[in-house]
Amino acid sequence: MSKPKGFEKPAGVRDYLPHAVVRLRQIEHQVLACMDRWGYQQIMTPTMEYYDTVGVASSTSDQKLFKLLNNRGTTMVLRSDITAPIARVVSSLLKEEPLPIRLSYHANVFRAIEEEAGREAEFFQTGVELVGDDSPEADAEVVALAIESLQAAGVEKFRIALGHVGFLNGLLEEVLPDRIEDQENLKHDLLDRDYVGYRNTISGLDLTDVQTDKLEGILRLRGGREICEQALELSSDPLARASIEHLCKVWEVIEAYNVSEHVLIDLTMIGDFSYYTGMTFEGYAAEIGSPVASGGRYDKLLQQFGRNVPATGFALKTNRILDGVQVKEASEQLPVLVQYTAEQRKEGLTQAALLRSEGRVVVTALISGEDEGYLARQEDASEHGLLHKGYAEILTFS
């Protein structure tokens, strides 16, 4: 392998130029401010964690983790999400805090598989975790906050697809009792949104017409409040029915938030079924097909850190919003140029400091003797309103 050139960087990572950083910080600040108004306090966790703790607890599959060895030979990982590190903190440093606990974050995460797929290996997430509340109110709260956070990020047209992994698990166990491999294959088809593959998998299972109708019926369960009643008619399994009843209550709270126009129930949407334990959801912007937000309930995660409490949350895919969604740009504040000769340096820099204290952006420049011709041209341009396009104002001390 040839040695990389001085300007090269690893595949899957990127440089953020000033205009992109402005947008990224705009999204970050506006979304975190929104979360703060909902009572979520910001937390920061390490970029690097132990593989045997956060690494194995993460929802990210093992082959997607960036692993490295420290000087003692211990396997470490770069964080692949923020939820597992927060679970570690809530189970240790925040163990005595009264429940529920509301936390927010904005951070970069790393996933090795993204590089292989031609996507980003390092990207940003902005999200929340609500720990210690298993009620429909808590699930509805994170959905409503996800909607308001997307709006704060500048996303105007989007929909939230709401599902529940318990319904699918119950229905599959009802139709395919103890046929774990067949159930997993059908789940993978739904996770990949491969509905043709899902029907093909069903056709290869040697089922009765009634069983086939039940399994194919889930593909029609997409819509509003009426889907709850249709789902109850489709399955008599206790887990499936309890899951739908919970989802119906979540929908009622979402309606009370007056945001149901942004939400649809989609019982084919299961998220990462190895990780989520209840309600799941994804947010889609009109401009791009990939989710710009995802979340749900994960009641078993904190058990891996010795604390058995429920939790729910979501994350915005900040990079996708940055790159793929057209939003209103924040008006850029052009800087003031304060230029001065050596003799007038103190006066020039004093004026620059005064302007900065007023919130202005100021750039300073020393004018040397050979710049006098340039200075004269600048003064003439200033008098005629022909200031350099990169500055809001030019002040000269000479």
Image (cartoon, rainbow, N blue to C red):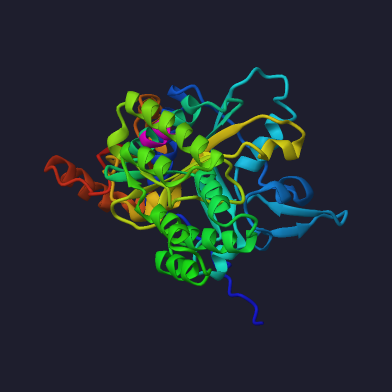
| Residue 2 location (% of width, % of height) | 64, 82
| 309 and 223: which is toward the camera | 223
Residue 342, picture quadrant: top left
| 201 and 299: which is toward the camera | 201
| Residue 375 location (% of width, % of height) | 27, 47
Quick one: which residue is furthest to the bottom in this view? 1
> Magenta span: helix, strand or loop, mainly?
helix
Quick one: which residue is furthest to the left in this view? 384
Q: Can residue 22 be seen in this view?
A: no
User: In the rendered view, would you say 338 is above or below 101?
Assistant: below
User: In the rendered view, would you say 74 is above or below 349?
Assistant: below
Q: Is residue 220 visible?
A: yes
Q: Taking 244 as reference, is 391 left or right?
A: left
User: In the rendered view, would you say 381 is above or below 73?
Assistant: above
Quick one: which residue is furthest to the top in this view? 98
Q: Does the magenta stretch include residue 144?
A: yes
The residue drawn where x is 22% and y is 47% is 378
Magenta segment: 142-147
| Residue 385 location (% of width, % of height) | 13, 42
Residue 35, picture quadrant: top left
Q: Taking 83 as reference, is 144 left or right?
A: left
The residue drawn where x is 47% and y is 25% is 137
Quadrant in which the N terminus is drawn: bottom right
